[in-house]
Image: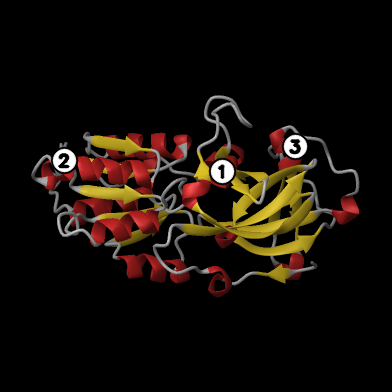
Amino acid sequence: MNGTTFTQTDILLESGTNELEIMEFTIAGEIFGINVAKVREIMKFSPVKPMQNAHPSIEGIFKPRGDVITVVDLAKYLGLSESACLERDIFMITEFNGQVIGFHVHSVVGIDRISWVNIKKPDSIIYGGGEGVATGIAEFEGRLITILDFEKIVAEIAPQTSIQLSDIEKLGPRSRSNIPILIAEDSMLLSKMIVESLHKAGYMNTIKTDNGQEAYDFLEEAKHEGDISSHVACVISDIEMPRMDGHHLTKLIKDDPALKSLPVILFSSLINEEMKLKGKEVGADAQISKPEIASLVALIDTLTKQQHA
């Protein structure tokens, strides 16, 4: 397991099937999961160089093949027991939000293919109090797998790498708009930041849902009430969400004659060239990587043809 690399070609599933592949890993005997699309490589544990004045959960940095990578000790972050045998531990090298980060875990179990329908929203008190740090609980072959919110973990450790409200100010003067924007985002932290950013950008009428299924249910209800544009003018969707992911939501919208004219923007930490192919296949109008919030607002302006003073 020394330097096992994962390519996006290996893990891309058929577009819009509402499935994902999860890598199972353990910390202190507990089972956790991460979307394989976030994992670039798994490596054996190696000593790291500590960083002064760093967040307590940052173990240090190491330099495999010339790349300097920050390592986060997930056991320390989650408040779980340290490893009993460091020599057997694993570094999961991840890539999302345009960043490469290593996560120190105790073992890697394997990869499972699971439907988002079988992933449930966890109790909010799990790992981190009110907002929690688990995006879902998956049951697979009798095992309960806690899927961690890696974006939230990184945002707490390094806030400067997440969505910045100050980026909206760089867009210049903005006028207010009451057009309805539907948001599908399962992370409570990121959902709150997206809504605050859109309000700061002048988009005051936002409808927040926690996953693709809730967003689609809202659209179905709005569709039967008449003119869809009076209820929703644009959909912003994450990709990774319990019950229904963003690709499946987009496919359902674009396959429905009454909804297909709705602009859909995929706003996700997973956006890269390979994943863009999946978004294009299901009909997304635009795709942009978190945390580029100013670019997201510019896309909404264009797709809804809003004019700002």
Amino acid at circle 1: Asp
The reply to whether discs 1 and 2 touch (Cβ–Cβ < 8 Å) is: no
Q: Which residue is mark 1?
A: 149
Q: Which label belongs to residue 231? A: 2
What residue would you read off at disc 3?
A: 76
**Considering depth in this image, is 171 or 152 the residue closer to the camera?**
152
Identify which residue is drawn at 14% across, 53% down: 305
**On screen, residue 134 above or below 262:** above
Element under label 1? loop
N-term mark: 3 or 2: 3
Image spot of residue 179 (x, y percent): 16, 41
Question: Does residue 53 appear to the left or right of 278 in the view shown?
Answer: right
Q: Amino acid at mark 2?
A: His
Q: Position of residue 276 (x, y in %)?
A: 40, 67
Measured along the vertical axis of the image, is residue 8 above or below residue 269? below
Given residues 220 and 175, the one toward you in this image is 220
Q: CA distance from mark 1 to mark 2?
A: 30 Å
Query: How far across and down, in percent of the image, does residue 117 sit?
Result: 46, 49
Query: The disc labelled 3 sits on which kind of residue?
Result: Lys
